[in-house]
Image: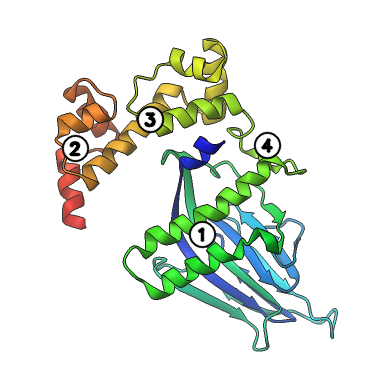
């Protein structure tokens, strides 16, 4: 699990602050990204699509699958049954380089949420939440201090100092790691939706691939890492990832090559060797198939855009 979590890559799309007053409802469109919604304080309800509501208590965390609309309600204790006052917010078209504040109501808020939208992958290749169809609801405690990295992420986006994007993604990764730690002790079955976490031997092999994509991996060596037979490894790996081990390995190698081409000045031959290719020509063919561009042109285009 340790090496697997190390392979997490997080890209922040948007970060919002949602404040809902008693008797108000905030409705949000579905987003093309996974949402993480953490309740800083107050009590209310969160509806995802047409599902039954999730109770929002202080330190409730909800993961919302991509593309699913949601609404946040803060019931009014003084006038139960009164019609809701509604604020409808569309998904913003601008980038997530600042914190947005969505307010429903003109009185002190009863529900205070930090809402982050993100893409997360294992080894920059496998979308961890890609197959998630139902929301995940977990109740944390104040001692878990989940609010601290989220507040720090908001502060980073407000100040917009150099490296704020990377720092914000790192802070959000802390929250996700704490959530995934729950897989070791949670009494619920939501973790079974992540098939890689439900199959530790396969997770161990993938973590090895993600940590050392340039190593001379083969189906046989990876099966030995998993401590299962070659045929069982092939079947179980393909069931988890939906593609063969060598296809996943190639994707990991190409992702690593793209990073080396963008952030360093290694010659193409050295990049090829670093990601496990003995032949420059075979590396170039694989890279062109993945990115539609020769490695040298890819590097030049990235330099011009930076």
Quadrant of the frame with the N terminus: top right
Indicate the position of residue 56 as horizontal and vertical percent values.
73, 65
Residue corresponding to mark 2: 295
> Does the CB distance between marks 1 and 2 fall below 8 Å?
no
Camera-near label (4 vs 3) is 3
Asked if 207 appears above or below 300 in the picture, the reply is above
Q: Is residue 84 visible?
A: yes
Camera-near label (1 vs 3) is 3
Asked if 191 appears above or below 42 in the picture, the reply is above
Asked if 171 appears above or below 71 in the picture, the reply is above
Residue corresponding to mark 3: 212
Q: Give the residue at x 75% y 70%.
A: 44
Horizontal side of residue 229 vs 80, given as left or right: left
Residue corresponding to mark 1: 117
Horizontal side of residue 197 vs 255, given as left or right: right
* Mark 1 or 3, nearer chain start: 1
Foreground residue, 92 or 8? Answer: 8
Residue corresponding to mark 4: 192
* Mark 4 or 1, nearer chain start: 1
- Neighbour class for label 1 at 10 Å: few (<14), some, many (≥20)? many
SS for dot 1: strand
Q: Give the residue at x 24% y 38%.
A: 292
């Amino acid at each position: 699990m340790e090496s697997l979590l190390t392979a997490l890559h997080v890209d922040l799309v948007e970060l919002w602050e949602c404040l809902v007053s008693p008797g108000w409802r905030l409705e949000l469109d579905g987003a093309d990204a996974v949402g993480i919604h953490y309740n800083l304080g107050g009590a209310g309800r969160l509806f995802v699509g047409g599902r039954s509501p999730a109770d929002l208590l202080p330190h409730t965390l909800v993961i919302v699958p991509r593309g699913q609309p949601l609404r946040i309600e803060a019931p009014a204790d003084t006038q139960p049954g009164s019609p809701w006052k509604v604020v409808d917010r569309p998904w913003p078209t601008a980038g997530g380089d600042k914190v947005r504040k969505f307010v429903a109501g003109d009185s002190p808020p009863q529900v205070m949420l930090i809402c982050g939208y993100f893409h997360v992958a294992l080894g920059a290749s496998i979308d961890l939440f890609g197959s998630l169809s139902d929301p995940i609801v977990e109740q944390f405690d104040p001692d878990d201090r989940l609010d601290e990295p989220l507040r720090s992420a908001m502060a980073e986006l407000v100040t917009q100092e150099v490296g704020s994007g990377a720092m914000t993604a790192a802070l959000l990764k802390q929250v996700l790691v704490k959530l995934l730690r729950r897989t070791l002790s949670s009494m619920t079955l939501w973790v079974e939706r992540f098939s890689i976490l439900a199959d530790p031997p396969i997770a161990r092999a993938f973590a090895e691939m993600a940590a050392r994509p340039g190593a001379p991996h083969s189906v046989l060596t990876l099966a030995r890492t998993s401590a299962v037979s070659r045929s069982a490894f092939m079947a179980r790996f393909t069931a988890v990832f939906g593609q063969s081990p060598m296809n996943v390995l190639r994707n990991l190698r190409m992702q690593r090559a793209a990073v080396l081409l963008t952030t360093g000045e290694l010659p193409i031959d050295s990049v090829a060797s670093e990601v496990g290719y003995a032949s420059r020509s075979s590396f170039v063919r694989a890279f062109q198939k993945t990115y539609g561009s020769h490695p040298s042109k890819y590097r030049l285009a990235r330099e011009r855009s930076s």
